[in-house]
Each structure stands twice: as C-alpha cells, then as structure tokens.
Image: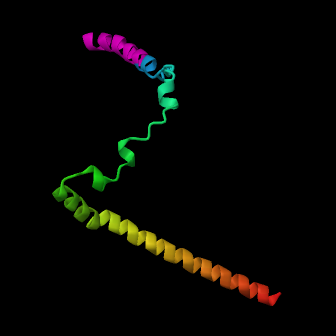
Amino acid sequence: MNNIKLYHYLIPLGLSLAVVSCKAPAVAPTPASAPIPEAYVTSKDTANIASTPWKTFFKDKNLTDLIDVALKNNQELLLRCKKLRLLKAKSACAKGLFYQRLALALEQM
C-alpha cells in the first residue's frame, strides 16, 4: 500500500523534472573584444625570428646535421612530394588530352 502512494508522488515529480530539464541552454553573450593597441598595428619591426633561416639560427653543427637528416628522411614529406608529382603528371595528361581534342575540333572546322 505504501508503494502505491509513493508512486503517486514520484511519477509526477519525475515527469515534471524531465519536462523542466529539457530546456535548451541560453546563448552566452560574447564579451566585447578589446581594441588592438596602435603599437602592434603600425609596427615596422622586421627583426623577428621568422625571417631568420634555421641553419643560421641554430649554431650547433650536430643539431643542424640531425635536422638535415630528418628532413631528408621525412617519410610523410616524401609521400606528399610523390603524390604532388603524380597529381602534376595527371594534370599534364588531362591538359594534353584536352588540347589534342581542341586541335582536332579546330581542324574539323
């Protein structure tokens, strides 16, 4: 008997909690971005690390040798280069077929 009365209270409570919890969250407002200082916008500084070649940046001979070997044996880079060569060859082949058809069409005119 007690279980039946308990279900009379728990079922409506569970359903009401389910209905209330199914609300979509509110969109959070985006904070206003701070303006960029003029020192960054009008900077004419060209002395940064990006413009220095890596061979002159690293002074250690062993380190530069290791980097050279790593770049020469980079499997992913070699694979990308092979794929690029293959795509260039396919493109040249397609262009050749296109120009051949174009020349044939012009001859028939």
> Is there any visible trace of residue 62 in the rendered image?
yes
Does 88 appear above or below 108? above
Any magenta on residue 15?
A: yes
Which residue is depicted at the point 78% across and 85% down?
106
Does 86 appear above or below 66? below
Q: Nearer the viewer, residue 92 or 60?
A: 60
| Quadrant where the N terminus is found in the figure | top left
> Is there any visible trace of residue 27 in the rendered image?
no
- Secondary structure character of the magenta stretch overall: helix
Q: Nearer the viewer, residue 106 or 43?
A: 43
Q: Position of residue 41 (x, y in %)?
A: 51, 30
Which residue is depicted at the point 56% across and 80% down?
93
Which residue is depicted at the point 35% across and 10% down?
9
Q: Residue furthest left?
A: 62
Does 66 appear above or below 4? below
Q: Position of residue 76 (x, y in %)?
A: 32, 63
**Left or right of 104: which side holds 65?**
left
Does 19 appear above or below 99? above
- Callout count: 0
**The magenta segment:** 1-17
Which residue is depicted at the point 31% across and 10% down?
5
Residue 6 found in image quarter: top left
| Quadrant where the C terminus is found in the figure | bottom right
Q: Position of residue 74 (x, y in %)?
A: 28, 64
Any magenta on residue 21?
A: no
Q: Nearer the viewer, residue 94 or 49?
A: 49
Q: Residue furthest right?
A: 109
**Left or right of 5: which side holds 41?**
right
Q: Position of residue 14 (x, y in %)?
A: 37, 17
